[in-house]
């Protein structure tokens, strides 16, 4: 048996230090020189950003330090790098400013993943036809909920008024005191233009309701694609990406793709009722676990103690809550392939 060798510190090899090496740090650059702007388009890992005071967008990528931070049209961001906008140039988005409002939805009412559709819009223009395809109250009610809880002012915009009287459908939402504008192909758009001027307005609606036609009238050089409605009430999805378009009179229109469904898995009854100050104060007296739907489900709901305009508003809000619980695909506007 051979003798055992013993080692001491003189036997240990020390790797020489690499010249110029620096210890790793978690510190990130502050990018105090970042220029602020608004995201106007998003497509396959590239964002178009119009910097404050500029006209043309700059093409940007997302900086590594932002990770998988979701950046959507309407967001206010900080940009560094080549901001000249020259062909082939590429800047970096290094900061996402806090959002003032968020339009979000889920794929359906069981999906826990929230999809942010638009950031920082002042108002939501809910575009629906009064005929061909027929209007869907459930979809409008869900869109109203999304606007209320996302801090956007909702506006109901009715199209195809040459095919049916829009007053009948508009009356269903009278107690919520939301503005209603008519925007058929033969209607003057002065009222719509007055509402969207100097605001950031998101547009949503099903395919085939005339949303792209409306956008083309508001922004004549937009050239948004339009498509015919099929015989079963489903239109070709003519807008595939959200895009912000500058209005001639000031402000922005954010056109969103035709929406097939509007899930609200992230919204509960208390959140909806809490939007309305008079109702929020009243439901503080509801029993624990009250769904605010009234009898027979909630025989002691405090909303039933209201009178006059507040009671009518409570009944209208209950319709919104019913829309949250509904599984009627056609009424909600969930289009099945």
Image (cartoon, rainbow, N blue to C red):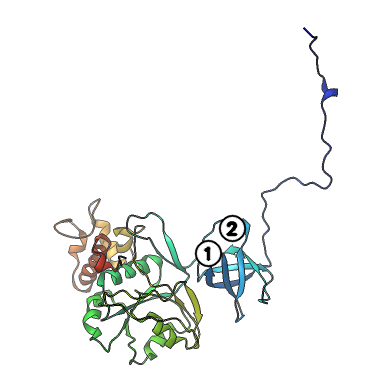
Dot 1 crowding, Cα within 10 Å, few <14, some 14–19, many 20+: many
Dot 2 crowding, Cα within 10 Å, few <14, some 14–19, many 20+: few
- Give the alpha-carbon distance from disc 2 to disc 1, as whole Å: 10 Å
Most foreground residue, 297 or 22: 22
Residue found at x 81% / y 18%: 7
What quarter of the picture does the N terminus occupy?
top right
Q: Is residue 31 left or right of residue 129?
A: right
Residue found at x 31% / y 63%: 272
The quarter of the displayed image where residue 292 is located: bottom left
What quarter of the picture does the C terminus occupy?
bottom left
Most foreground residue, 43 or 53: 43
Most foreground residue, 5 or 99: 5
Looking at the image, which residue sits at the far left? 296
Q: Is residue 293 left or right of residue 333?
A: left
Image coordinates of residue 20 in percent, x first then y, are: 82, 48
Secondary structure at numbered mark 1: loop
Secondary structure at numbered mark 2: helix
Image coordinates of residue 159 in percent, x first then y, are: 31, 83
Image coordinates of residue 110 in percent, x first then y, are: 33, 55
Quick check: 4 above or below 144? Answer: above
Quick check: 20 above or below 232? Answer: above
Find residue 144 and name its label.
Answer: none
Quick check: 10 above or below 249? Answer: above
Looking at the image, which residue sits at the far right? 10
Image coordinates of residue 121 in percent, x first then y, are: 45, 73
Find residue 66 and name its label.
Answer: 2
Tags 2 and 1 in contact by the CB under 8 Å rule?
yes
Residue topped by disc 1 = 71
Q: Is residue 14 left or right of residue 84?
A: right
Which of disc 1 and disc 2 is earlier in sequence? Answer: 2
Q: Is residue 186 left or right of residue 286?
A: right
Looking at the image, which residue sits at the far top? 1
């Amino acid at each position: 048996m051979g003798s055992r060798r013993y080692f001491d510190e003189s036997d240990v090899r020390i790797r020489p230090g690499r010249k110029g090496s620096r210890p790793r740090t978690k510190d990130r650059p502050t990018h105090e020189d970042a220029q602020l702007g608004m995201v106007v388009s998003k497509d396959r890992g590239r964002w178009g950003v119009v910097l404050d005071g500029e006209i043309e967008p700059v093409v940007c990528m997302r900086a590594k330090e932002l990770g998988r931070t979701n950046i959507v049209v309407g967001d206010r961001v900080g940009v560094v790098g080549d901001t000249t906008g020259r062909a082939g140039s590429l800047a970096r988005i290094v900061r996402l400013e806090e959002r003032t409002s968020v339009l979000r939805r889920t794929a359906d009412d069981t999906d826990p993943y929230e999809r942010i559709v638009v950031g920082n819009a002042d108002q939501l223009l809910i575009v629906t036809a009064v005929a061909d395809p027929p209007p869907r109250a459930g979809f409008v009610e869900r869109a109203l909920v999304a606007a209320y809880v996302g801090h956007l002012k909702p506006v109901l915009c009715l199209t195809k008024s040459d095919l049916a009287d829009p007053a009948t459908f508009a009356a269903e939402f009278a107690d919520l005191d939301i503005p209603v504008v008519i925007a058929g192909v033969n209607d003057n758009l002065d009222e719509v233009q007055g509402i969207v001027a100097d605001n950031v307005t998101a547009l949503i609606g099903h395919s085939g309701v005339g949303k792209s036609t409306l956008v083309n009238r508001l922004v004549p050089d937009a050239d948004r694609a339009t498509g015919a409605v099929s015989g079963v009430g489903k239109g070709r999805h003519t807008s595939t990406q959200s895009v912000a378009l500058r209005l001639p009179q000031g402000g922005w229109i954010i056109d969103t793709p035709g929406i097939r469904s509007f899930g609200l898995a992230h919204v509960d009854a208390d959140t909806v009722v809490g939007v309305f100050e008079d109702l929020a104060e009243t439901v503080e007296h509801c029993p624990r676990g009250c769904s605010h739907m009234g009898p027979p489900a909630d025989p002691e709901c405090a909303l039933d103690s209201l009178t006059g305009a507040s009671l009518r508003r409570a009944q209208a809000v209950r319709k919104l809550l019913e829309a949250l619980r509904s599984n009627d695909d056609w009424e909600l506007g969930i289009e099945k392939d």
